[in-house]
Amino acid sequence: MKNATKLGAVVLTTVFGGNTAIADPLAHTYSIVARDPDSGEMGVAVQSHWFSVGSIVTWAEAGVGVVATQSFVDPGYGLRSLALLKEGREASDVLGTLVEADAQRDSRQVAIVDAQGHVAAHTGSACIASAGQHVGLQFSVQANMMANDRVWPAMAEAFEQAGGDLADRLLAALEAGQAAGGDVRGRQSAAILIVKGESTGRPWAGADRVFDLRVEDHPEPLQELRRLMRLQRAYNHANRGDELMAVNRVDEALAQYSRAADVAPEVLELPFWHAVTLASVGREAEAMPIFARVFGREPQWAALLPRLPAAKLMPDDPALMARILAQAPPRR
Protein backbone atom coordinates (compact mmCIF):
# COMPACT_ATOMS: atom_id res chain seq x y z
CA MET A 1 0.00 0.00 0.00
CA LYS A 2 1.08 3.61 -0.54
CA ASN A 3 0.89 6.79 1.47
CA ALA A 4 1.06 10.11 -0.41
CA THR A 5 1.40 13.55 1.16
CA LYS A 6 1.36 16.78 -0.82
CA LEU A 7 4.07 19.18 0.33
CA GLY A 8 4.14 22.37 -1.74
CA ALA A 9 5.60 21.64 -5.15
CA VAL A 10 6.02 17.89 -4.76
CA VAL A 11 4.13 14.77 -3.86
CA LEU A 12 6.09 12.46 -1.60
CA THR A 13 5.13 8.84 -2.13
CA THR A 14 6.38 6.04 0.10
CA VAL A 15 5.92 2.40 -0.74
CA PHE A 16 5.59 0.56 2.56
CA GLY A 17 7.65 -2.55 2.81
CA GLY A 18 10.07 -1.35 0.12
CA ASN A 19 12.86 1.13 -0.38
CA THR A 20 11.22 3.40 -2.96
CA ALA A 21 10.57 7.05 -2.20
CA ILE A 22 10.07 9.73 -4.83
CA ALA A 23 9.70 13.47 -4.75
CA ASP A 24 8.40 14.39 -8.18
CA PRO A 25 7.64 17.93 -9.33
CA LEU A 26 4.13 18.62 -10.48
CA ALA A 27 3.45 19.71 -14.06
CA HIS A 28 -0.28 19.40 -14.57
CA THR A 29 -0.47 20.88 -18.00
CA TYR A 30 -1.07 20.44 -21.68
CA SER A 31 1.58 20.05 -24.36
CA ILE A 32 2.33 19.00 -27.92
CA VAL A 33 5.30 17.20 -29.46
CA ALA A 34 5.66 17.14 -33.23
CA ARG A 35 7.93 16.76 -36.25
CA ASP A 36 7.64 18.79 -39.44
CA PRO A 37 7.96 16.32 -42.35
CA ASP A 38 9.15 19.04 -44.74
CA SER A 39 11.92 20.66 -42.69
CA GLY A 40 12.63 17.76 -40.34
CA GLU A 41 12.42 20.16 -37.40
CA MET A 42 11.07 18.72 -34.16
CA GLY A 43 9.42 20.66 -31.38
CA VAL A 44 7.65 20.59 -28.07
CA ALA A 45 5.40 23.32 -26.64
CA VAL A 46 3.58 23.55 -23.33
CA GLN A 47 1.39 25.77 -21.13
CA SER A 48 0.50 25.28 -17.47
CA HIS A 49 -0.62 26.95 -14.28
CA TRP A 50 2.77 26.28 -12.72
CA PHE A 51 5.91 28.37 -12.50
CA SER A 52 8.60 27.70 -15.14
CA VAL A 53 6.88 24.72 -16.72
CA GLY A 54 9.37 24.62 -19.58
CA SER A 55 12.25 23.83 -17.25
CA ILE A 56 10.92 20.35 -16.51
CA VAL A 57 8.51 19.38 -19.31
CA THR A 58 10.40 20.14 -22.57
CA TRP A 59 13.29 18.04 -23.86
CA ALA A 60 14.82 17.93 -27.34
CA GLU A 61 17.99 17.15 -29.25
CA ALA A 62 18.60 17.88 -32.92
CA GLY A 63 18.64 14.77 -35.07
CA VAL A 64 17.35 12.69 -32.16
CA GLY A 65 13.85 13.60 -30.98
CA VAL A 66 11.61 15.58 -28.65
CA VAL A 67 9.96 14.63 -25.36
CA ALA A 68 7.27 16.06 -23.09
CA THR A 69 7.17 14.65 -19.57
CA GLN A 70 4.38 15.93 -17.31
CA SER A 71 1.74 15.17 -14.67
CA PHE A 72 3.90 13.88 -11.77
CA VAL A 73 7.12 14.54 -13.63
CA ASP A 74 10.15 12.31 -13.70
CA PRO A 75 12.67 14.50 -15.61
CA GLY A 76 14.61 11.31 -16.23
CA TYR A 77 12.11 10.48 -18.94
CA GLY A 78 13.54 13.37 -20.94
CA LEU A 79 17.19 12.49 -20.46
CA ARG A 80 16.79 8.73 -20.80
CA SER A 81 14.46 8.97 -23.78
CA LEU A 82 16.95 11.04 -25.74
CA ALA A 83 19.80 8.73 -24.78
CA LEU A 84 17.88 5.64 -25.95
CA LEU A 85 16.76 7.35 -29.15
CA LYS A 86 20.42 8.10 -29.92
CA GLU A 87 21.03 4.36 -29.83
CA GLY A 88 18.68 4.04 -32.81
CA ARG A 89 15.61 2.82 -30.96
CA GLU A 90 12.14 4.00 -32.03
CA ALA A 91 9.87 6.14 -29.91
CA SER A 92 7.44 3.36 -28.97
CA ASP A 93 10.26 1.04 -27.91
CA VAL A 94 11.87 3.76 -25.81
CA LEU A 95 8.67 4.78 -24.06
CA GLY A 96 7.63 1.18 -23.48
CA THR A 97 10.96 0.40 -21.86
CA LEU A 98 10.82 3.39 -19.53
CA VAL A 99 7.17 3.00 -18.56
CA GLU A 100 7.60 -0.70 -17.83
CA ALA A 101 10.45 0.05 -15.43
CA ASP A 102 8.60 2.87 -13.64
CA ALA A 103 6.75 1.95 -10.45
CA GLN A 104 4.93 5.30 -10.67
CA ARG A 105 3.84 4.84 -14.29
CA ASP A 106 0.16 5.40 -13.48
CA SER A 107 0.91 9.00 -12.46
CA ARG A 108 3.00 9.84 -15.53
CA GLN A 109 2.10 11.49 -18.81
CA VAL A 110 4.80 11.32 -21.47
CA ALA A 111 5.03 11.76 -25.24
CA ILE A 112 7.94 11.22 -27.65
CA VAL A 113 8.55 11.92 -31.32
CA ASP A 114 11.77 10.61 -32.84
CA ALA A 115 13.75 11.96 -35.79
CA GLN A 116 11.95 9.62 -38.20
CA GLY A 117 8.54 10.86 -37.10
CA HIS A 118 7.55 7.82 -35.03
CA VAL A 119 5.30 8.80 -32.11
CA ALA A 120 4.56 7.25 -28.72
CA ALA A 121 2.50 8.55 -25.80
CA HIS A 122 1.43 7.37 -22.36
CA THR A 123 -1.24 8.73 -20.02
CA GLY A 124 -1.33 6.93 -16.70
CA SER A 125 -4.63 5.95 -15.13
CA ALA A 126 -3.90 8.09 -12.05
CA CYS A 127 -3.37 11.35 -13.96
CA ILE A 128 -5.80 13.97 -12.67
CA ALA A 129 -8.93 14.41 -14.77
CA SER A 130 -9.64 15.61 -17.26
CA ALA A 131 -6.68 13.81 -18.80
CA GLY A 132 -6.01 12.24 -22.15
CA GLN A 133 -3.99 12.22 -25.35
CA HIS A 134 -4.33 12.14 -29.12
CA VAL A 135 -1.63 10.68 -31.37
CA GLY A 136 -1.64 11.86 -34.96
CA LEU A 137 0.71 11.80 -37.92
CA GLN A 138 4.13 12.74 -36.52
CA PHE A 139 2.63 14.49 -33.49
CA SER A 140 0.98 13.90 -30.14
CA VAL A 141 -1.04 16.17 -27.85
CA GLN A 142 -1.55 15.35 -24.19
CA ALA A 143 -3.17 17.05 -21.23
CA ASN A 144 -4.05 16.49 -17.59
CA MET A 145 -5.97 18.47 -14.96
CA MET A 146 -7.90 20.17 -17.75
CA ALA A 147 -11.19 22.01 -17.41
CA ASN A 148 -12.82 19.44 -19.71
CA ASP A 149 -12.10 16.61 -22.14
CA ARG A 150 -12.35 18.84 -25.22
CA VAL A 151 -8.90 20.36 -24.72
CA TRP A 152 -6.64 17.79 -26.40
CA PRO A 153 -8.98 17.07 -29.35
CA ALA A 154 -9.10 20.83 -30.01
CA MET A 155 -5.30 20.97 -29.90
CA ALA A 156 -4.97 18.12 -32.39
CA GLU A 157 -7.45 19.68 -34.80
CA ALA A 158 -5.77 23.07 -34.62
CA PHE A 159 -2.33 21.61 -35.26
CA GLU A 160 -3.53 19.63 -38.27
CA GLN A 161 -5.30 22.64 -39.80
CA ALA A 162 -2.84 25.43 -38.99
CA GLY A 163 -0.59 26.97 -41.60
CA GLY A 164 2.91 28.35 -41.21
CA ASP A 165 6.04 26.70 -39.93
CA LEU A 166 6.32 24.27 -37.03
CA ALA A 167 6.49 27.06 -34.44
CA ASP A 168 3.27 28.62 -35.75
CA ARG A 169 1.49 25.27 -35.67
CA LEU A 170 2.65 24.37 -32.16
CA LEU A 171 1.47 27.69 -30.80
CA ALA A 172 -1.85 27.32 -32.64
CA ALA A 173 -2.35 24.02 -30.80
CA LEU A 174 -1.68 25.62 -27.41
CA GLU A 175 -4.02 28.50 -28.16
CA ALA A 176 -6.76 26.08 -29.20
CA GLY A 177 -6.29 24.17 -25.96
CA GLN A 178 -6.67 27.36 -23.96
CA ALA A 179 -9.74 28.38 -25.96
CA ALA A 180 -11.32 24.98 -25.23
CA GLY A 181 -10.91 25.45 -21.47
CA GLY A 182 -7.24 24.83 -20.74
CA ASP A 183 -5.85 24.06 -17.31
CA VAL A 184 -8.68 24.05 -14.76
CA ARG A 185 -6.55 26.28 -12.49
CA GLY A 186 -5.82 28.91 -15.15
CA ARG A 187 -2.48 29.78 -16.73
CA GLN A 188 0.94 30.94 -15.58
CA SER A 189 3.84 29.77 -17.76
CA ALA A 190 4.57 28.43 -21.23
CA ALA A 191 7.50 27.30 -23.35
CA ILE A 192 8.48 26.25 -26.85
CA LEU A 193 11.60 24.30 -27.87
CA ILE A 194 12.31 23.47 -31.53
CA VAL A 195 15.45 21.76 -32.84
CA LYS A 196 16.74 21.01 -36.30
CA GLY A 197 16.19 17.67 -37.97
CA GLU A 198 19.93 17.11 -38.15
CA SER A 199 22.58 18.28 -35.73
CA THR A 200 25.08 20.90 -36.86
CA GLY A 201 27.69 19.31 -34.63
CA ARG A 202 27.85 22.58 -32.65
CA PRO A 203 25.11 22.28 -30.02
CA TRP A 204 27.12 24.36 -27.58
CA ALA A 205 26.73 27.35 -29.89
CA GLY A 206 22.95 27.09 -29.95
CA ALA A 207 23.09 26.28 -33.66
CA ASP A 208 20.90 23.19 -33.27
CA ARG A 209 18.01 25.12 -31.69
CA VAL A 210 15.58 27.11 -33.80
CA PHE A 211 13.45 28.28 -30.85
CA ASP A 212 14.18 27.90 -27.14
CA LEU A 213 11.83 30.24 -25.30
CA ARG A 214 10.23 30.22 -21.87
CA VAL A 215 7.65 32.43 -20.22
CA GLU A 216 8.24 31.64 -16.57
CA ASP A 217 5.42 33.67 -15.03
CA HIS A 218 2.88 35.85 -16.84
CA PRO A 219 -0.87 36.54 -16.71
CA GLU A 220 -1.10 35.75 -20.46
CA PRO A 221 1.76 33.33 -21.15
CA LEU A 222 0.72 32.41 -24.69
CA GLN A 223 0.47 36.05 -25.75
CA GLU A 224 3.91 36.66 -24.30
CA LEU A 225 5.26 33.51 -25.96
CA ARG A 226 3.96 34.73 -29.33
CA ARG A 227 5.73 38.07 -28.78
CA LEU A 228 9.00 36.32 -27.92
CA MET A 229 8.66 34.09 -30.97
CA ARG A 230 8.41 37.18 -33.17
CA LEU A 231 11.58 38.58 -31.60
CA GLN A 232 13.35 35.25 -32.03
CA ARG A 233 12.45 35.25 -35.73
CA ALA A 234 13.96 38.73 -36.06
CA TYR A 235 17.20 37.70 -34.38
CA ASN A 236 17.31 34.53 -36.48
CA HIS A 237 17.34 36.76 -39.56
CA ALA A 238 20.08 38.90 -38.05
CA ASN A 239 22.17 35.85 -37.18
CA ARG A 240 21.73 34.51 -40.69
CA GLY A 241 22.91 37.87 -41.98
CA ASP A 242 26.09 37.52 -39.93
CA GLU A 243 26.68 34.06 -41.39
CA LEU A 244 26.26 35.39 -44.94
CA MET A 245 28.59 38.33 -44.30
CA ALA A 246 31.24 35.91 -43.08
CA VAL A 247 31.31 34.31 -46.56
CA ASN A 248 31.04 37.67 -48.36
CA ARG A 249 27.47 37.20 -49.59
CA VAL A 250 26.81 40.87 -48.92
CA ASP A 251 23.51 41.45 -50.73
CA GLU A 252 21.93 38.37 -49.16
CA ALA A 253 23.21 39.41 -45.73
CA LEU A 254 21.79 42.89 -46.07
CA ALA A 255 18.43 41.43 -47.07
CA GLN A 256 18.45 39.38 -43.86
CA TYR A 257 19.32 42.41 -41.74
CA SER A 258 16.53 44.38 -43.36
CA ARG A 259 14.07 41.57 -42.73
CA ALA A 260 15.12 41.42 -39.05
CA ALA A 261 14.36 45.12 -38.62
CA ASP A 262 10.98 44.71 -40.34
CA VAL A 263 9.96 41.82 -38.07
CA ALA A 264 10.86 43.66 -34.84
CA PRO A 265 10.80 47.40 -35.56
CA GLU A 266 10.81 48.26 -31.86
CA VAL A 267 14.30 46.77 -31.42
CA LEU A 268 16.60 49.53 -32.65
CA GLU A 269 19.75 47.45 -32.29
CA LEU A 270 18.73 45.50 -35.38
CA PRO A 271 18.66 48.47 -37.81
CA PHE A 272 21.77 49.88 -36.11
CA TRP A 273 23.87 46.89 -37.15
CA HIS A 274 22.19 46.90 -40.55
CA ALA A 275 23.35 50.49 -41.00
CA VAL A 276 26.85 49.63 -39.75
CA THR A 277 27.10 46.93 -42.39
CA LEU A 278 25.83 49.23 -45.14
CA ALA A 279 28.36 51.90 -44.21
CA SER A 280 31.15 49.35 -44.02
CA VAL A 281 30.57 48.09 -47.56
CA GLY A 282 30.40 51.53 -49.13
CA ARG A 283 26.63 51.99 -49.20
CA GLU A 284 26.70 55.14 -47.11
CA ALA A 285 23.66 56.78 -48.72
CA GLU A 286 21.48 53.85 -47.62
CA ALA A 287 22.99 53.79 -44.13
CA MET A 288 22.55 57.45 -43.20
CA PRO A 289 18.74 57.56 -42.87
CA ILE A 290 18.86 54.45 -40.71
CA PHE A 291 21.52 55.93 -38.45
CA ALA A 292 19.49 59.13 -38.16
CA ARG A 293 16.36 57.26 -37.14
CA VAL A 294 18.19 55.11 -34.59
CA PHE A 295 20.16 57.99 -33.06
CA GLY A 296 17.03 60.11 -32.88
CA ARG A 297 15.22 57.56 -30.77
CA GLU A 298 18.10 56.06 -28.76
CA PRO A 299 21.18 58.34 -28.61
CA GLN A 300 23.32 55.72 -26.90
CA TRP A 301 23.99 54.05 -30.25
CA ALA A 302 25.88 57.16 -31.36
CA ALA A 303 28.06 56.77 -28.25
CA LEU A 304 28.82 53.15 -29.18
CA LEU A 305 29.71 53.80 -32.80
CA PRO A 306 33.26 55.25 -32.36
CA ARG A 307 34.31 52.11 -30.49
CA LEU A 308 33.65 49.83 -33.46
CA PRO A 309 36.71 50.47 -35.67
CA ALA A 310 39.09 49.26 -32.94
CA ALA A 311 37.07 46.07 -32.76
CA LYS A 312 37.32 45.77 -36.56
CA LEU A 313 33.56 46.07 -36.93
CA MET A 314 33.83 49.23 -39.08
CA PRO A 315 36.49 50.79 -41.30
CA ASP A 316 38.97 53.03 -39.50
CA ASP A 317 37.83 56.10 -41.44
CA PRO A 318 37.52 59.28 -39.31
CA ALA A 319 35.75 61.17 -42.09
CA LEU A 320 33.13 58.47 -42.45
CA MET A 321 32.69 58.37 -38.68
CA ALA A 322 32.17 62.13 -38.56
CA ARG A 323 29.55 62.02 -41.30
CA ILE A 324 27.64 59.28 -39.50
CA LEU A 325 27.78 60.99 -36.10
CA ALA A 326 26.45 64.16 -37.73
CA GLN A 327 23.15 62.26 -38.05
CA ALA A 328 22.76 62.29 -34.27
CA PRO A 329 20.61 65.05 -32.72
CA PRO A 330 22.53 67.81 -30.88
CA ARG A 331 23.18 67.14 -27.23
CA ARG A 332 21.19 69.30 -24.88
Image (tube, grey):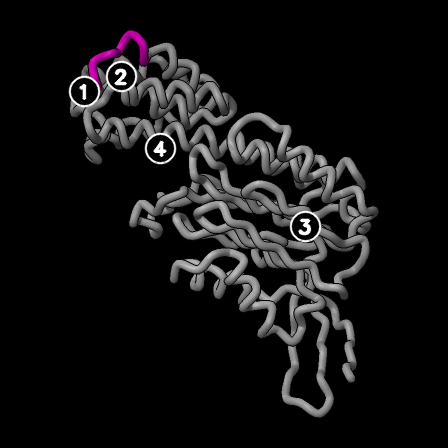
Q: Nearer the viewer, mark 2 or mark 1?
A: 2
Q: Which mark is residue 318?
A: 1
Residue 77 located within the stretch drawn in magenta: no
Marks 2 and 1, Cα distance to the nearest angstrom? 25 Å
Q: Position of residue 183 (x, y in %)?
A: 77, 48
Tell me, yes or no, whether the two marked residues, 2 and 1, touch with CB atoms within 8 Å.
no
Q: Quadrant of residue 144?
A: bottom right
- Sequence-wise, the earlier of marks 2 and 3 is 3
* Callout 4 amino acid: Asn
- Sequence-wise, the earlier of marks 1 and 3 is 3
Q: Position of residue 218 (x, y in %)?
A: 68, 44
Q: Secondary structure at mark 2?
A: helix
Q: Which mark is residue 251?
A: 2
In the picture, measured across the screen, residue 70 lies left or right of residue 153, that is: left
Residue ID for mark 4: 239
- Sequence-wise, the earlier of marks 2 and 1 is 2
Residue ID for mark 3: 142
* Callout 3 amino acid: Gln
Magenta region: which residues? 281-287
- Sequence-wise, the earlier of marks 4 and 3 is 3
